[in-house]
Image (cartoon, rainbow, N blue to C red):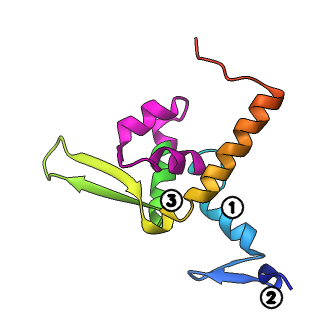
Amino acid sequence: MKDECKGDYVKVNGKIYPCSVSLTMDLVGGKWKAVILYHLMDGHKRFSELCREMGTVTEMTLSLQLKQLEKDGLVFRKVYGTKPPIKVIYGLTDFGKSFIPVLESITKWGNQIVSEKGEFVNAD
């Protein structure tokens, strides 16, 4: 029997999911969460760096997604200083780093699709 089928549901942090895939997608699913994690794979970044690297994400969306990733324990936020301008950096927690092999597989699969069915293009 598959592990995810041992019970009718899975429960993590008081939240009930129909299966472990649903749990995973709750943590990293959506348009931006995995992209944020991808950009943090190589090290800590400031908010403005993430905005610049991600291009089309709005500041509001990025802020909300970072807060959710922080709440779920995948990303940490560290504030330097107490008076403006303060410096804030984001990085992967150990839990977030455990997702890196999955991100690498997703990236490899996406690159394969592009090479077989599309092309890489530069913004105008």
Instruction: Identify the secondary structure beneath mark 2.
Output: loop
On screen, 75 above or below 110?
below
* Amino acid, disc 3: Gln
Q: Picture quarter containing residue 79?
A: bottom left
Mark 3 and mark 2: Cα distance apart in space: 29 Å
Pair 1/2: label in front = 2
Q: CA distance from mark 1 to mark 2?
A: 19 Å
Would residue 31 be found to the left or right of residue 77 on screen? right
Residue 70 placed where, x, y %?
A: 44, 61
In the depicted structure, whether residue 69 falls above or below residue 46: below
**Residue 39 x/y as whole percent:** 49, 44
Q: Are marks 1 and 3 in contact (CB under 8 Å)?
A: no
On the rendered structure, is 5 left or right of 59?
A: right
Helix, strand or loop for disc 3: helix
Report the residue marked by disc 2. Answer: 6
Main secondary structure along the magenta-highlighted residues: helix
Which residue is the site of mark 1? 25
Residue type highlighted by circle 1: Met
Which quarter shows the N terminus? Answer: bottom right
- Mark 2 Cα-neighbour bin, 10 Å: few <14, some 14–19, many ≥20: few
Q: Residue sitting at 73 percent across and 44 percent down?
A: 109
Which label sits on residue 68? 3
